[in-house]
């Protein structure tokens, strides 16, 4: 699966005719320099520059589990940077410079295409063609996406349905959506929420009990630590949600604050810490600088930190706001190591103030995507001896990726604070638990046994996989409601791996070492299950 992004300059022919060719070429080179930055920032690849247009891929040559989201984020940033660039074009040439974008997600053929004299790495297929049609149908300054892309990104972005439109080369009209912007609070990209189905938590009772026992230790005067470790889809976030729901019923419930890592955030300095601070002050990333500055000042006043305190200046600088204030503007010339030390002191001060009157639980999600700056600051934060008289718990959620920057936090806690560390390692659901989950999801007693067995065989005890397979069956009208019950309306046994799982699996495969990928290719040819000695024999290692 690849998400293709087409962008072109509106009215470029007329602009080119009215300008000197050299000026036009220079202008377009500057424009491409500007708009390529968001593409690379979200780890896309530019396949082609075509005079006044650009074609980029997200998912080729390297796949990510959220490529459609990355593509739309890149498109929004691309248009934002274009708006700034357009001001200089208007001043220099008296021309209106605007771009439009089209995006589509689908299967493509990727590889080197060409003759003996020239080769080009590109993708071909209907998915790419449809992205080009989306771009051609877009208004100046707009982003149009296909229904397929919309299904992936709807929880994250505000979309406006434009209904079906006629598209060249398509026998039937295509449903199209315009991207209006990012949602203030993003929803879940995974699971059955969109289908209106609640997923019960099954097979995690002991894990939840361990977390509740850890919560009871918050009455002590030493910081407590929790590590929740599990592969993608095993239900880490769901377990934490149930944990939060359970402790919210307590008489003196703790203050709960979350920091979320971004999948493309490894190169974004302090992005995890910034998200935590934004959630403390209730200022989402979509808030303006003025709104964020007001929220920061108000929150610090509420918890007893004066406006004159240097904590305000350093946190404002961390959030990239208030640059016009003298106290903050001068921080731009500070030595980076000294600045990091001041960031740490400010976050420490913030945490101590928050936990002064009630227990505090800080939850850091997906730290396998943490950037090195956030990891380093958090390592120093959890080692802070000044928290010894505060009721604070640090919870870190991660995949078991020992090579990731964030794993240093888990390793450090295991070495230095094992007596105050609760580790929850999630395993796949058993066959019986898997059957219980499927039955609870859809009340599927009426489904044929072979249908349930087909779902279980595909998902192998992974709750996320189960939810995504069920969601796909509903989307494809293979499962439907009749008389208030879910029944099989089509051939469940022939189900394919859903697109969301393909993206997740391809992303994991693409980041494996080359020799491991070769072993995986050979294994996939042998079959779904086989003896290790067979693989060793084929590879010549027996």
Image: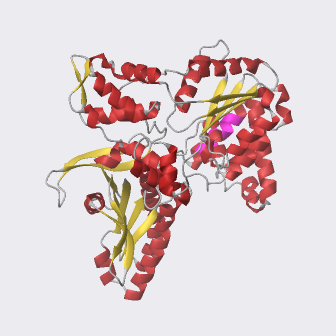
Q: Is residue 68 left or right of residue 340?
A: left
- In this view, 363 is above or below 171: above
Q: Is residue 2 left or right of residue 250?
A: left
- The x, y position of residue 50, in whole percent, is 35, 75
Give the magenta range: 292-300
- In this view, 24 is above or below 530: below
- What's the image's color scheme? secondary structure
- Residue 254 visible within the image: yes
- The residue nearer to you, when weighing 416 against 312, is 416
Residue for point 56% across, 47% down: 262
- The x, y position of residue 144, in whole percent, is 32, 54
Residue for point 26% across, 22% down: 448
Q: Is residue 487 magenta?
A: no
- Marks counted in the figure total 0
Residue for point 27% across, 32% down: 492
- The x, y position of residue 381, in whole percent, is 77, 40
């Amino acid at each position: 699966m690849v998400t293709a992004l087409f962008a072109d300059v509106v009215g470029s022919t007329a602009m080119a005719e009215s300008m000197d060719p050299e000026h036009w070429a220079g202008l377009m080179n500057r424009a491409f320099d500007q708009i390529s930055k968001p593409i690379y920032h979200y780890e896309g690849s530019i396949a082609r520059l075509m005079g006044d247009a650009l074609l980029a891929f997200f998912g080729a040559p390297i796949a990510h589990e959220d490529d459609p989201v990355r593509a739309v984020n890149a498109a929004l940033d691309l248009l934002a940077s274009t708006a700034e660039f357009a001001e200089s074009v208007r001043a220099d040439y008296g021309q209106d410079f605007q771009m439009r974008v089209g995006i589509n997600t689908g299967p493509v053929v990727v590889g080197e295409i060409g003759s003996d004299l020239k080769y080009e790495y590109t993708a071909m297929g209907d998915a790419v063609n449809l992205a080009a049609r989306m771009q051609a149908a877009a208004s100046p300054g707009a982003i149009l996406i296909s229904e397929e892309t919309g299904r992936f990104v709807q929880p994250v972005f505000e979309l406006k349905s434009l209904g079906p439109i006629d598209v060249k080369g398509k026998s039937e009209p295509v449903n199209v959506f315009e991207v209006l912007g990012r949602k203030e609070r993003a929803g879940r990209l995974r699971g059955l929420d969109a289908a209106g189905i609640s997923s019960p938590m099954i097979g995690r009772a002991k894990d939840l009990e361990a977390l509740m026992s850890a919560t009871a230790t918050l009455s002590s005067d030493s910081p407590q630590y929790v590590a929740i470790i599990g592969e993608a889809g095993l239900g880490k976030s769901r377990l934490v949600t149930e944990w939060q729901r359970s402790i919210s019923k307590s008489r003196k419930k703790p203050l709960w604050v979350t920091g979320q890592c971004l999948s493309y955030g490894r190169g974004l300095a302090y992005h995890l810490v910034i998200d935590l601070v934004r959630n403390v002050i209730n200022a989402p990333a979509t808030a303006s600088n003025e709104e964020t500055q007001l929220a920061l000042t108000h929150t610090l006043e509420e918890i007893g930190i004066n406006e004159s305190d240097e904590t305000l200046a350093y946190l404002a600088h961390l959030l990239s706001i208030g640059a016009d204030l003298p106290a903050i503007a001068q921080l731009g010339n500070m030595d980076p190591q000294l600045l990091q030390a001041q960031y740490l002191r400010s976050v420490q001060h913030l945490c101590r103030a928050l936990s002064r009157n009630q227990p505090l639980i800080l939850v850091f999600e997906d730290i396998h995507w943490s950037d090195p700056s956030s990891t380093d600051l958090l390592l120093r934060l959890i080692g802070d001896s000044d928290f010894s008289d505060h009721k604070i718990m640090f919870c870190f959620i991660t995949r078991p990726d020992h090579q990731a920057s964030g794993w240093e936090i888990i390793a450090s806690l295991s070495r230095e604070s094992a007596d105050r560390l609760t580790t929850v390692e999630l395993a796949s659901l058993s066959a019986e638990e898997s059957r219980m989950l499927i039955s609870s999801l859809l009340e599927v007693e009426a489904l044929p046994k072979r249908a349930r067995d087909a779902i279980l065989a595909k998902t192998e005890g992974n709750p996320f996989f189960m939810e995504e397979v069920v969601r796909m069956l509903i989307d494809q009208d293979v499962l439907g409601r009749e008389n208030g019950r879910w029944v099989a309306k089509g051939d469940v046994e022939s189900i394919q791996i859903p697109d969301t799982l393909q993206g997740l699996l391809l992303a994991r495969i693409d980041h494996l070492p080359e020799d491991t990928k070769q072993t995986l290719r050979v294994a996939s040819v042998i079959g779904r299950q086989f003896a290790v000695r067979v693989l060793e024999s084929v590879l010549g290692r027996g």
